[in-house]
Image (cartoon, helix red, strand yellow):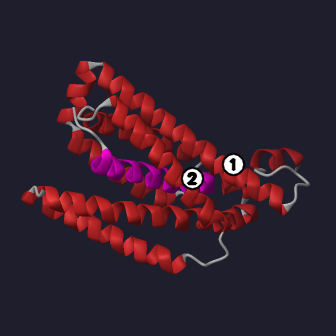
Amino acid sequence: MRTDIAQTSFFPLGSDEVAQQRLFVQTVYAWMTGGLLVTTLAAWATLSIPVIFELSLSLRWLLAIAMIGLVIYLSARIEQMAPSTAKALFLLYSVLTGKTLAVLFYAYTAESLATVFLITCGTFAATAFYGYTTKRDLSSVGSFMFMGLIGIILASLVNLFLQSSALTFATSIVAVLVFVGLTAYDMQRIKEMYATAAQNEARATNYAIIAALALYLDFVNLFLNLLRLLGRRR
């Protein structure tokens, strides 16, 4: 019996609710940070090896489709899959993102990439802190942000044909606002995920992974849109 508990227990035995919630949030951020590190290394490796860069460039649409498929699969099957599978798929997604972003990063100077990254970190941290500490229910904000996200996707699809710099600029501004809002919303939602994880410790790691994926996507998309607005091209 004790062996079973040891295998499925996520939270230390005897820990109080505050400590458990803190551990869950720390786990989420550890995986998110790990994912960003893997993405950075994958992007650096892709940029450093011409053959891999050319391959990533030629397969960029296939990579994008694979990434969308991974997010959908992870979101739909997270409660059924083994924790090891959830971890592996999250890391795979991080690698694919790095290979995809390398093509975009090539167009910008290293200085502007570093500057925008620091701005993104500050914006994300402040927004996440607000989302975690506010007493206001952000459910309505989340719904509004998801509507905005759909609008951004549609505008981006239209702009594939129009190739309008003005539409790109406007879409990027709206996208920054949307992902700032989603960061606060997702951070608050982590509290709800903790409550679910506390009732099902065998799947607590899975909940932490899907929460990390949500914040990872918020961070990456916030960074990309700030880069379009503030980045300096080569």
**x, y percent for residue 192:** 65, 69
Above or below, 159 against 4 in this view is: below
**x, y percent for residue 80:** 56, 58
Taken as a whole, is the magenta stretch helix, strand or loop? helix
Q: Inspect the magenta stretch and tell me whether residue 197 lies in it.
A: no
Q: Crowding at label 2, few (<14), some or many (≥20) Cα neighbours within 10 Å?
A: some
The image quadrant where one finds the C terminus is top left
Q: Nearer the viewer, mark 1 or mark 2?
A: 2
Over which residues does the magenta segment extend? Answer: 206-230
**Which residue is painted at 38% across and 26% down in the image?**
44
**Which residue is painted at 14% across and 64% down in the image?**
158
- Identify the residue under disc 2: 125
Q: Inspect the magenta stretch and tell me whether residue 229 lies in it.
A: yes
**x, y percent for residue 72:** 40, 58
Specify which label sits upstream in the sequence, 1 or 2. 1
**x, y percent for residue 218:** 45, 55
**Which residue is painted at 34% across and 62% down in the image?**
175
- With 35 as the anchor, is 59 left or right in this view? left
Tag 1, which secondary structure?
helix
- With 57 as the anchor, is 131 left or right in this view? right
**Which residue is painted at 38% across and 60% down in the image?**
176
Q: What is the spatial separation of the Cα atoms under label 1 and label 2, in whole angstroms?
A: 14 Å
The amino acid type of the residue labelled 2 equals Ala
- Identify the residue under disc 1: 26
- With 94 as the anchor, is 63 left or right in this view? left
The amino acid type of the residue labelled 1 equals Gln
Above or below, 118 against 19 in this view is: above
Res 187 quadrant in image? bottom right
